[in-house]
Every structure is written in C-alpha cells, then in structure tokens.
Amino acid sequence: MKKLLIPALFIFWFTNTYAQQKEVTITIDPISENIYMLTGQGGNIGVFKNEKGLFIIDDQFARLSDKILKNLKTISDQPVSMVINTHFHGDHTGGNGNMANQGATIFAQKNVRSRMESNQKEKGNITPQSLPVITFDEGLQLYFNSESIKAYHVHNAHTDGGALIYFANGNVLHMGDTFFNGRYPYIDLKSGGSIQGYINASEKALLIANDDTKIIPGHGSLATKKDLEGFSRMLKEITNAIQKEIDAGKSEDDVTKNTSLTAIYDAKGFGDGFINSERIRQTIYMSLTKENKTQKSL
C-alpha cells in the first residue's frame, strides 16, 4: 500500500511545478489594527506593523520575495525587521535568506533550524543566512509598544518544530500548518509529525482562542474558533474510527480503501485540497500504528 505515496508525491511535484509557471497574485487583507494576512503561493503570511518595522510570520518561496516585499510597502515603508517561522517546510521558509539579506532577524523553534540545516547539507546547498538565528524550545515572548506576541511550541503535530503565534492585543492566532481550514491536513510523519500531536495542537489553540479570535491557518481562508472546532472534531472522529479498524485487525490497505471512514467530511469538501481522503486515511493509519508500536516498547 506504500505505493500510494509515489503518485501522491508525483502529483505534488507536478502541481507545484505547474503553479510556479503561473503568475502569482499577492493579496493583503487587514485583520486587526496593524495586523494583516498576506496570501500568495505557499503558507499564509501574518504581518504586524510596529515601531521596529514589519514583523512577519513565514515568508513563502524565495522566488516570491521581491513581489511580497513590494506588496508589503502598501502597509509600511519600514523594512521587514523580524521573521518567525511556524515550521521548516519550504513554502513557509523559502524566503528566509532574502529577508535576512534585507536586514530581518529570523526566529523559530529550535527543531526548525536543525531540520533546515540538515536538509541543506543533504542537498549540498548551504545557505546560513536562511537559517533562524534565534531559536526557542517551548515558547517565546516578544513585546512591542502596542502588542504582546507569544510563540508556543506544539510537539509532533504537523512536524516536530511547529509553533502557534498569538497576538494578545489584536487577538489574532497564526497556526501555521497545524490548521488547514476546511481541508484535510498534511501530517509530515517523516519529520516528527503525528495525528495525536496534531489533535493536541488544535486543542492547545482552542484554549488560546475565544469567540472573537481571528485565526490564520497555514492554508485556507481566515478562520474563527468555530471553524477550528469543526476541524478538531473532524480529526478526532476520523482518528477514532480508524483506531477501531486497527483494533479489529484491519490492514493499512483495508483502511486506506474504506471510504466510509471519511465519507461525512468528504461530502463537505475536506478532501478537495492537497491531501485527499484516501491519503488522510493512510496517513492516520500509519501514525496510529507507529504510536501503538512505540507505546508497546516502553
């Protein structure tokens, strides 16, 4: 059943290559006073205008940096002074080097730097300026004249270096790829991600958010706590259903092909994004069986 991942990766490569050939439109939408969401290609970018310049969350692909910077000028003539990465994937960190060359300081959870550094060494393309220069373990607090920003490390969710970024005064929460609004998520099992960690991340976010919180997902449109509650419920219901199948002795192939396990959410369009219903069933199965083996060995 592992063969399923090969066409999935091919589709990702083909889609990404095709997308690179298309003209990318950058859109900036105001969320709260001095806080904005920038969409283009890749992960959604959070933007905060402050006395030190522009603070941004993630920076998409390197080839989009000039276009992103040009559009940011519509918010402020001040430069991007700080960037915080929600995790290490290239559609969220690809612009790091360009932002650093413009004078920005890069922040991230410590595993983000480790994984970026490791990937660069494997590819033989070492670019130190793209790496976070300030890292944190469990959390980070930043203070500005008009805003207090808190970064929370969420363990083994989308990856092992995920962070939630919360603007206390603006009441805006950026979740990175621990939240795909209205879509099944991509859980990077090879990089420390897991379904239980993903569920824990959504529960952590729900503790931070209230009914008025504006939530920026890693991918998808701006969301509310109600949207996140629905997403969290989806994760739990499908995970519980697949765990029952595992307990009944069903194989990976059985679970992957069992459309009834995700039918309710398939009908709502959750499988219309990058991760389809077949792949989310397989991913959750693989994550749960891996966790079960780990627990038995303890």
Image: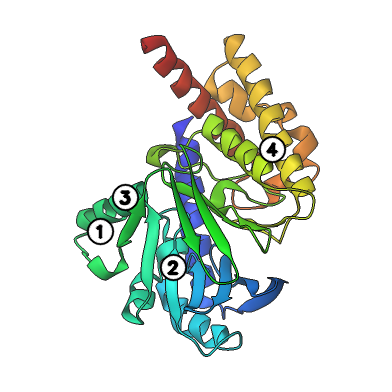
* Residue 44 seen in the current view: no
Nearer mark to the viewer, of 3 and 2:
2
Residue drawn at x 41%, y 71% as measured from the top left: 95
* Residue at 59% from the left image edge and 66% from the top image edge: 147
Q: Secondary structure at mark 3?
A: helix
Rendered residue at 55%/72% (across/down): 145
- Label 3, label 4: how far apart the Cα atoms are: 27 Å
Identify the amino acid type marked 4.
Ser
| Left or right: 219 as drawn, with respect to 12 | right
The tag earlier along the polypeptide, 3 or 2, is 2
Q: Amino acid at mark 1?
A: Gln
Callout 1 secondary element: helix
Q: Read off the residue under disc 2.
A: 83
Q: Amino acid at mark 3?
A: Arg
Label 3, label 2: how far apart the Cα atoms are = 17 Å
Q: Which mark is residue 120?
A: 1
Mark positioned earlier in the residue sequence (4 or 2): 2
Quadrant assignment, res 81:
bottom left
In the picture of the structure, the residue carrying the numbered disc 4 is 232
Count of marks, rendered view: 4
Q: Residue furthest front?
A: 145
Q: Are marks 3 and 4 in contact (CB under 8 Å)?
A: no
Amino acid of disc 2? Val
How many angstroms separate mark 1 from mark 4 (CA)?
34 Å
* Residue 67 position (above or below residue 198): below
Q: Tell me the colour scheme of the image.
A: rainbow
The relative height of residue 229 versus residue 55 in the rendered view (above or below) is above
Where residue 18 appears, x then y in whole percent? 52, 69
Mark 1 or mark 3, which is nearer the start of the sequence?
A: 3
Q: Earlier in the sequence, mark 2 or mark 1?
A: 2
At mark 4, the secondary structure is helix
Mark 1 or 4: the one toward you:
4
